[in-house]
Image (cartoon, helix red, strand yellow):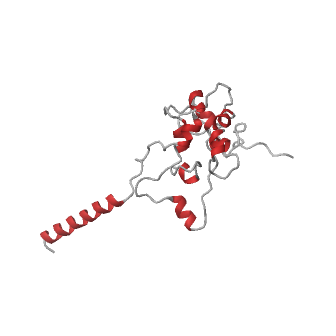
Amino acid sequence: MNKTRISTLAAGLLAALACHAQDEPQGPPPGAPPQPPPLLEALDSDGDKTISATEIEAAPESIRTLDADGDGTVRKEELRPKPPEGAPDPEREERKKGRPLKHPVPPVMAALDKNRDGALSGTEIDAAAGALLKLDKDGDGALTGEELRPPGKREPRADQEDGGEGGPPGPPPGGRGRPPGPPGQGGLPPRGR
């Protein structure tokens, strides 16, 4: 092959790769924080990750902004984050296969959705302020990140370098989950007689 033909082939390949890359869903950049669910985004109107007393009081009006079709009910589809432009919707793909995705119900949704149908009816929306106040564990009239977090998910402790979950430390290095025993016994407890 001559150099001209190789150069033409390489240019064509690069152009095809560039076109293919433009067709790929872009999504958020790697390492970007996840988008908050639309419900929390609507309730936390100032974006400070706390639902203040004023925001709780305004909850019914804030939730109604999610009612895209104006039918008075905020349906499951209206509560889900929108996938990035051109990206496949994983829930739709799983439903096509007959396997709907199971997600834990966030505390806010559990408090608001009294009949557990995954949508918010007009009656549930009207009662939103009172339902949200039931999540206020410290009684300060606002909902903090800790009160909005699903059970079992905690903030990393400030003294943890790796940012992992809090809780008891893992096994000691090389100790197979047992604390080291007296010297000369290889870290194993003495055998019973």
Considering every residue shown, the one lying at the far top of the view is 140
Please tell me whether residue 2 is drawn above or below residue 132 in the rendered image.
Answer: below
Q: Is residue 13 visible?
A: yes
Please tell me whether residue 4 is drawn above or below residue 18 in the rendered image.
Answer: below
Q: In the picture provided, is 21 more to the left or to the right than 64?
A: left
Q: Quadrant of residue 146?
A: top right
Residue nearest the observer in this picture, 152 or 54: 54
- Name the residue rendered at 66%, 53% in the picture: 117
Q: In the picture provided, is 148 more to the left or to the right than 17?
A: right
Please tell me whether residue 7 is drawn above or below residue 140 in the rendered image.
Answer: below
Considering every residue shown, the one lying at the far bottom of the view is 1
Residue nearest the observer in this picture, 17 or 19: 19
Q: Is residue 151 visible?
A: no
- Percent position of residue 100, x then y: 60, 61
- Percent position of residue 142, x then y: 61, 28
- Name the residue rendered at 42%, 47% in the picture: 30
Please tell me whether residue 65 is drawn above or below residue 90 in the rendered image.
Answer: above
- Percent position of residue 78, x then y: 53, 50
- Name the residue rendered at 60%, 32% in the picture: 56
How many numbered circles does the render carry? 0
- Percent position of residue 71, x then y: 56, 51
Q: In the picture provided, is 9 more to the left or to the right than 57?
A: left
Q: Quadrant of residue 57?
A: top right
Quadrant assignment for the N terminus: bottom left
Considering every residue shown, the one lying at the far right of the view is 193
